[in-house]
Amino acid sequence: MAEKKHLGDLLVEAGIITVKTLERALDRQKGTRKRLGMVLEEMGVITEEELAEALAKQFNFKTVKNLTSYSFPADLLQMVPQDLALQKLVFPLKRQDVMLALAITDPFDEETIEFISKRTGLKVYPVLTTRQEILSAISKHYLKGEEAKPPQRKRILVVEDTATVATVIKVALEKEGYEVLMASDGLEGLKLALTEKPDLIISDAVMPRMDAYEMQRTLKANAASVRIPIIILTSKASSEDEQKALEAGFLDFIPKPVNIVRVLSRVKRGLELMDTMQKR
């Protein structure tokens, strides 16, 4: 059997990246625990579609597109619970006899594939696609394409698992005239962001089920939520932590313990900045 080629080599052979770019990506990857594909995406040298195609070639998987154009029966969707679909970015495509075709974005996540196989009693057949495809499919088929009514006030989503901190922020924002949505963990925050389309998100960095960084990466992969600004709250307040947060794409960085005056001023500044950008 031929040895499976490395992702970087496949991308170079396809002319998507150069050898020099691959070397820079591998150097940047050291010590981060990130997949090479994620590093290349962050560098802006590869698209999600190109990555999915390369991974499919590497693992000898098929690919799938345009998931929102198909219909899926309720009993098929029930095989993969909504929260699991969102958290792991997987989507059931088709059941045939003892086989379940499953759209995935990460072929390295064998744990999730094995879990779904045991849960359903079926042999899972992975099919590669992009985060955008799966998020759009989840929004339409699990979340039923729910669209929030246009808010009369600016809508802020607060994602915080400490009830006292969440309540203090909520009360302060409401006093300033904002409409406030609440989520107690990252996965619930992701669902609310996709269905309610808030004007801005304030999120704790470390939370159950999904942290702020994973929630942010997922929202940025979806065309419908890519422009929602996120302010991160964190107890790690060094200059290196702030740089990491800003480089990851967060709009702003607020250290803990929370100072409400600082939160309100950063929210106001963030909303004004987004309004200015939308008018350009």
Image (tube, helix red, strand yellow):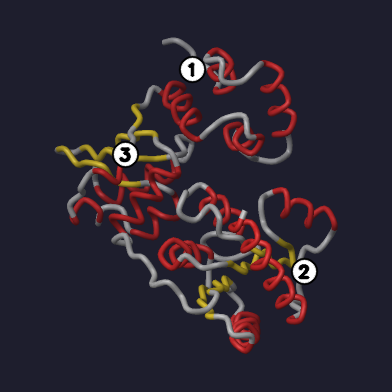
Observer-nearest residue: 50 or 229?
229
Q: Which is more foreground, mark 1 or mark 3? A: 3
**What is the distance, in whole Å, between disc 1 and disc 2 at their CAs?**
45 Å
Residue 27 point in image, percent of width and height: 74, 29
| Residue type, mark 3 in image | Asn
Q: Secondary structure at mark 1?
A: loop
Identify the residue position indicated by label 2 in the image: 255
Mark 2, other Cα within 10 Å: few <14 / some 14–19 / many ≥20: some
Q: Is residue 154 above or below residue 197?
A: below
User: At x 47% / y 65%, what residue is drawn?
Assistant: 197
Q: Quadrant of residue 255?
A: bottom right
| Residue type, mark 1 in image | Lys
Q: Are marks 1 and 2 in contact (CB under 8 Å)?
A: no
- Left or right: 185 as drawn, with respect to 75: right
Q: Which is more foreground, mark 3 or mark 2? A: 3
Q: Reading the chain from its start, which is encountered first: label 3 or label 2?
A: 3
User: At x 73% / y 33%, what residue is drawn?
Assistant: 28
**What is the distance, in whole Å, between disc 3 and disc 2 at their CAs?**
41 Å
User: At x 49% / y 28%, what residue is drawn?
Assistant: 50
- For residue 4, the mark is 1
Quadrant containing the N terminus is: top left
Residue 214 point in image, percent of width and height: 57, 53
- Left or right: 158 as drawn, with respect to 134: right
| Residue type, mark 2 in image | Pro
Residue that sits furthest to the right in the current view: 239
Mark 3, other Cα within 10 Å: few <14 / some 14–19 / many ≥20: few
